[in-house]
Image: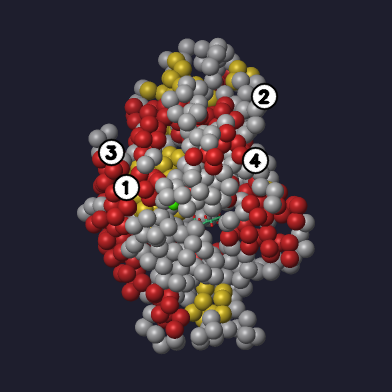
Amino acid sequence: APSEPWWKSAVVYQIYPRSFADSNGDGIGDLPGITAHLDHLTALGIDVVWLSPVYPSPQDDNGYDISDYEDVDPVFGSLADLDHLLAELHARGMKLVMDLVVNHTSDEHPWFVESRSSRDDPKRDWYWWRPPAADGGPPNNWGSFFSGSAWERDEATGDYFLHLFSRKQPDLNWENPEVRQAVYAMMRWWLDRGVDGFRMDVINMISKDPALPDGPQAAGAPYGDGGQSFLNGPRIHEFIQEMHAEVFEGRDAELITVGEMPAVTVEHAVLFTDPERRELDMVFQFEHVGLDHGPDGKWDVRTLDLRDLKRSLGRWQEALAERGWNSLYWNNHDQPRIVSRFGDDGAHRTASATMLGTVLHLHRGTPYVYQGEELGMANVGFERVDQLRDIESLNHHAHAVAGGADPVAVMSAIAAMGRDNARTPMQWDAGPHGGFTTGTPWIDVNPDHETVNAAAQVGVEGSVFEHYRRLVALRHDEPVVALGDFTMLLPDHPTVYAFTRRLGDDELLVLGNFSGMQVELPEEVVEPDAALLLGNLTGDVDPAVLRPWEARVLRRA
Ligand code: ISL
Ligand code: CA
């Protein structure tokens, strides 16, 4: 349909600048490094680049702690380098999405420096300041996402400030209209510069219940969970609608907006993405990447049950079928590598990586590819703390071990779930440091770069890269992939993921084997007359059998 927004048939590629390509040998990826590798993106065929933060930052959380919203950190280059990258992307027909991190700033942002200076500073109310509790401790029991209390006492006044993330990431007070207007002005400044949209960091946390009540606290747990006071909070839709009116109105057709929303529900997601409500184009939800977490959270690692994955993704497909839109992802800079997580990064690496890509990209929604996913990059298998860089993993390790946990068990959970798995350098070739840098990388390259790298895959038949290239092309070429209805099949099958997509008379059947065992297909999905549109394995196809990690996209006769 001609009236459908362009991003329904687009594929987005996420770049984590620190780990993509280093142009000057300081061991840290940068903007000129990205600009030098645009052929890789062109070959893949992607439409949009989402750039993780490149703004000036003390880098406490690798740039998600911003000290100036309208400049570029020298470690990544300059504003001129960014303008150049933007122009080069546009010249190649690609768009650029910036990361918008406005739930919090860095504690070194001038707004916070002023705010902390005294109780009657004009910007005092731009952040969440509260006096100590009666016992001198923090104002409530909330824990931070990065371990420890969510409150930090500040020497200047003796008050505490709220930080849901690190103590160097104080939360902005969106109740204050000056804060909101300052953010909107900054967003307009970027759009006027030519960028094509925003990925909005933890944007469903910006509305907080100003009472900041204690959250539920499990027996023996050091902190309470404040989530019910700040996840999808009381004014969240009002704030997002205001942002749309102030920033996007009149220019939104060319843009793409995606809200990152931990713990967003399908009910809220429909509201956020219903075009008539004028909020956001799509959201990142987290349900499917929480299915291998136990009751104690991400470090409580469990094995995925495929039926849970089908139930979850199927529910999101259904809930956003009529109104709203899904984003589709396996990976980002916060998640372990999917081939290690839901696939097999050993004997079946290529097959499982391509099967996973096929199943995801054939859903209805906008797919996001995280750098290296298109090569089947895997987890590292971290064994030692000195291999880690991420504040979340380092804080967790320190707190857990200090609390008496077995260090070997803590390390094995970090090896499985730690964010550094996603942050090892992009593997360009088999040479030293994978061709990422001529210097010493800020985090070690995965030793498997000798076999897993772009040079060994781009243009090479049978590679993960070439398969991802076909998946992107399929979405561009086949309206049924972008726009068709979705119907889940075989919900109770333990290893086969099966669904159809339908647009008018055109119907696709998608099959994926989530196991290393050959599987006999149930009769309802055996279609000897269907044409194979895309498969991930070579050799003879038996319509009644899926080989280990096989995926097929079939067009029904
Ligand atoms: O990976 C997580 C920790 O378990 C998530 O909770 C993650 O912190 C959450 O998805 C929010 O992520 C975003 O905001 C953080 C930043 O550290 C992440 O990199 C970013 O994607 C704070 O800005
Ligand atoms: Ca560099």
Residue 293 location in percent, x, y?
Answer: 64, 49
Mark 4 or mark 1: whose residue is earlier in sequence? 1
Residue position for label 1: 85
- The residue closer to the viewer here, 212 or 538, is 538
Q: Mark 2 or mark 3: which is in front?
A: 3
In the visual, does 176 lie left or right of 522? left
- The residue closer to the viewer here, 217 or 252, is 252
Instruction: Please tell me whether residue 437 is drawn above or below residue 124 in the rendered image.
Output: above
Neighbours of disc 4 within 10 Å: few (<14), some (14-19), many (20+): some
In three-dimensional space, the C-alpha distance between marks 4 and 1, rounded to whole angstroms, equals: 39 Å
In three-dimensional space, the C-alpha distance between marks 2 and 3, rounded to whole angstroms, equals: 42 Å
Q: Mark 4 or mark 1: which is in front?
A: 1
Kind of residue at badge 2: Met
Would you say residue 127 is visible in this rendering? Answer: yes
**Which label was assigned to residue 517?**
2
Residue 385 location in percent, x, y?
Answer: 67, 55
Mark 4 or mark 2: whose residue is earlier in sequence? 4
Residue position for label 4: 304
In the image, what residue occupies the spot 63% across and 68% down? 148
Neighbours of disc 1 within 10 Å: few (<14), some (14-19), many (20+): many
Mark 2 or mark 3: whose residue is earlier in sequence? 3
**Which label was assigned to residue 437?**
none
Asked whether the residues under the numbered discs 2 and 1 touch, taking CB atoms below 8 Å apart as contact, a structural biologist would say no
In the image, what residue occupies the spot 56% across and 36% down? 449
Instruction: Please tell me whether residue 214 is drawn above or below residue 2 in the rendered image.
Output: below
Neighbours of disc 3 within 10 Å: few (<14), some (14-19), many (20+): few
Kind of residue at badge 1: Leu
Residue position for label 3: 93
In the image, what residue occupies the spot 70% across and 48% down? 383
